[in-house]
Image (cartoon, rainbow, N blue to C red):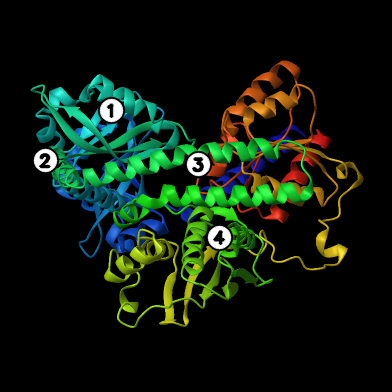
């Protein structure tokens, strides 16, 4: 019985050995690496199919051959010097092997020495992995680095690279030339020592590490000899995958000579402008002297409007105030022609109601017209959108000039003002204006020069009717700056028709046109769950037109809106009331949006509360959303307001708050 049991054990061991050999064979043959086995005399006695494939060799090429034939002599000599037999194992040695066709192959070799129980070397196992692609990539990377170094060293700008501690770790040759420094003086030098203290303080104040970059900053740098040079500096912050700052790249160009040349140009320009000083002083003095009583007139009208008045008195005073404002605008704009010619007039992009401007200007000039026994009448296209984007002051200035001239040169009949839509697109609305009179007209000789400055036509009419002769020239400049065109048709003795087009900004889904009866489903916002029906919203917006539009949009959902004009008013209201959400403009007087939300967040740390704040701003550049969210806002909506996006942002934030 015992013998039988022993026989069974031996049979099991034999079976395990067979299975072990089969497993080894499977692993050996299916290895992705080339494997060679040598005997004690370093002759190849076994190999796998990958070895044949990698080397392009057969059994006759490998069996019983010295393993040294697989390596170039230089590489085999290097292998010998590593004393592998002593160490017993070496891993991941970059070397080369010789294929059957004579080509060299880059491989990573790992060698294990085989020893018997007495420690005698009986052979070795070699594992080879093809690293041709890795070597090629490494070679291409080195070439790329070399090319980059060549480019940097031949760049006309000084380039410095700093580490996370703002120490210089790399630079190009031009940097050495610009600063007059060598390797020892630049390596690990704090970058701030390249700039005068006051300049470095100014650079720091720009928060470049936060914004990520700053390009074409004019500053000054210090050379090794202590001399100060003017430079154009561009900085880009380097970050790792986690967003941590790991350094920066700075590019500097010496602009000392350009600055000197620019200063000479400025001096020459100042010298040229001095020739016109007398005229400028005279116009400025006249403007000041006339504005002083006009300010008093407007101030008294405003004070009177604050007192109890009947409807007719209020309307009369408002017309008088509009007329006074128009007159003051004309006085202020006496210098506009020279400013426009010099490119100094800036056209504003504000939300305006064109029909209201036209009516107010016409009403303001009706007094002058009635004194002459003529009428001022107007026709306004009902298709004109209620709110457009343009410059109300400049539009009013053009209308006042043209209508005032028409009244001045007309002795009977009427002055007709027409405004209609010429073209309406997705982003622009072009309006056509007409000012038609049946006055003295313009002679064919003077008609081509009517928009010129100080022509004989202007001189003649100025002597007879008064005026400076600058009005039409100013109108032409302003209309052209507002993306428009102006022209005139006239017959001497029969009257004139001045026509001009202006392109205004327009967004259909924000600025509705003339009132049109709509179904409730079109006016109402999206359906809301019961918990979002009676939201209390605090709106911070200093522009009254924007405030009115936003309030109307929100109240359509039945939400209660409290509107304030600046951040300080927000804080004051929050002391006494609570809200479900705050809509916050950024650029407001007294206290801006970001500063306000930071105060709110500091106070909430004490109370443990959190009110959602949505930035509602005209700042819509790349990165602005992230900047506002990083500054403490919970949401972001850009102007012009997309009402659907505004609804979605409010509902999303309030819903999140209710769930939490």
The residue that appears at 42% across and 75% down in the rendered structure is: 487
Camera sees residue 40: yes
**Residue contact at pointers 1 and 2, CB within 8 angstroms:** no
Left or right of 73? Residue 107 is right
Counting residues from the start of the chain, the first of labels 1 and 2 encountered is: 1
The residue that appears at 59% across and 63% down in the rendered structure is: 506
Q: Which residue is mark 1?
A: 86
The alpha-carbon separation of the residues under discs 3 and 4 comes to 18 Å
The residue that appears at 36% across and 68% down in the rendered structure is: 461
Label 2 neighbour load within 10 Å: few <14, some 14-19, many 20+: few
Q: Which residue is mark 4?
A: 368
For this orientation, the residue located farthest to the top is 606
Q: State which mark lies toward you, 1 or 3.
A: 3
The alpha-carbon separation of the residues under discs 4 and 2 comes to 59 Å
- Front one among 403 and 549: 403
Name the quarter where the N terminus is drawn. top right
Counting from the top left corner in percent of width and height, residue 427 is at 56, 65
Q: Which residue is mark 2?
A: 257
Res 610 quadrant in image: top right
Counting residues from the start of the chain, the first of labels 4 and 1 encountered is: 1
Q: Which residue is mark 3?
A: 294
**Residue contact at pointers 2 and 3, CB within 8 angstroms:** no
Label 4, secondary structure: give it: helix
Counting from the top left corner in percent of width and height, residue 344 is at 34, 50
Left or right of 52? Residue 516 is right
**Residue contact at pointers 1 and 3, CB within 8 angstroms:** no
């Amino acid at each position: 019985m015992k013998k039988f049991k022993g026989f069974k054990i031996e049979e099991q061991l034999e079976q395990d050995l067979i299975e072990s050999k089969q497993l080894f064979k499977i692993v050996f043959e299916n290895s992705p690496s080339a494997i060679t086995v040598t005997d004690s005399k370093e002759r190849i006695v076994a190999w796998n199919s990958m070895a044949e494939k990698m080397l392009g060799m057969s059994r006759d090429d490998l069996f019983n051959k010295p393993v040294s034939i697989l390596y170039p002599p230089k590489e085999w000599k290097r292998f010998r010097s590593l004393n592998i037999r002593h160490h017993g194992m070496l891993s991941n040695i970059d070397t080369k092997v010789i294929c059957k066709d004579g080509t060299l192959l880059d491989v990573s070799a790992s060698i294990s020495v085989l020893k018997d129980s007495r420690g005698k070397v009986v052979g070795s196992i070699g594992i080879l992995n093809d690293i041709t692609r890795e070597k090629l990539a490494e070679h291409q990377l080195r070439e790329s680095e070399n090319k980059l170094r060549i480019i940097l060293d031949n760049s006309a700008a000084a380039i410095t690279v700093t580490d996370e501690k703002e120490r210089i770790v790399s630079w190009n040759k031009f940097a050495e030339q610009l600063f007059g420094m060598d390797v020892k003086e630049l390596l690990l030098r704090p970058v701030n020592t390249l700039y005068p203290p006051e300049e470095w303080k100014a650079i720091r104040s720009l928060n470049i590490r936060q914004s990520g970059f700053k390009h074409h900053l004019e500053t000054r740098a210090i050379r090794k000899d202590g001399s100060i040079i003017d430079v154009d500096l561009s900085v880009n912050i380097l970050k790792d995958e986690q967003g941590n700052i790991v350094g920066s790249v700075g590019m500097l160009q010496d602009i000392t000579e350009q600055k000197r040349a620019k200063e000479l140009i400025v001096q020459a320009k100042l010298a040229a402008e001095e020739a016109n000083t007398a005229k400028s002083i005279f116009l400025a003095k006249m403007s000041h002297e006339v504005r002083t009583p006009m300010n008093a007139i407007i101030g008294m009208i405003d004070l009177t409007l604050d007192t109890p008045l009947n409807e007719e008195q209020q309307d009369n005073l408002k017309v008088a105030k509009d007329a006074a404002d128009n007159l003051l605008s004309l006085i202020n704009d006496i210098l506009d022609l020279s400013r426009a010619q010099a490119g100094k007039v800036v056209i504003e992009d504000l939300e305006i109601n064109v029909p209201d401007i036209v009516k107010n200007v016409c009403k303001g000039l009706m007094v002058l017209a009635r004194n002459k026994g003529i009428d001022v009448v107007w026709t306004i296209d009902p298709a004109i959108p209620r709110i457009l984007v343009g410059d109300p002051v400049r539009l009013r200035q053009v209308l006042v000039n043209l209508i005032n001239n028409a009244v001045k040169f007309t002795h009977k009949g009427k002055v007709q003002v027409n405004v209609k839509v010429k073209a309406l697109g997705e982003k622009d609305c072009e309006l056509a204006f007409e000012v038609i009179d049946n006055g003295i007209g313009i002679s064919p000789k003077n008609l081509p020069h009517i928009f010129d400055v100080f022509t004989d036509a202007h001189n003649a009419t100025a002597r007879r009717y008064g005026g400076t002769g600058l009005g039409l020239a100013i109108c032409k400049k302003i209309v052209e700056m507002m993306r428009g065109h102006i022209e005139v048709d006239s017959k001497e003795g029969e009257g004139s028709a001045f026509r001009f087009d202006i392109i205004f900004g327009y967004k259909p889904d924000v600025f509705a046109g003339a009132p049109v009866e709509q179904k409730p489903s079109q006016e109402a916002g999206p359906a809301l769950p019961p918990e979002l029906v009676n939201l209390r919203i605090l709106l911070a917006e200093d522009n009254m037109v924007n405030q009115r539009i936003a309030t109307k949009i929100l109240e359509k959902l039945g939400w209660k809106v409290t509107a304030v004009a600046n951040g300080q008013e927000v804080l004051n209201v929050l002391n006494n009331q609570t809200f479900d959400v705050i809509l916050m403009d950024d650029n407001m007087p007294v206290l801006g949006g970001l500063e306000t939300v930071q105060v709110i967040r500091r106070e909430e740390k004490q109370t443990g509360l959190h009110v959602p704040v949505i930035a509602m701003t005209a700042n819509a550049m790349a990165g602005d959303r992230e900047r506002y969210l990083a500054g403490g806002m919970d949401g972001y909506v850009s102007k012009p307001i997309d009402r659907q996006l505004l609804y979605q942002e409010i509902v999303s934030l309030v819903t999140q708050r209710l769930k939490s």
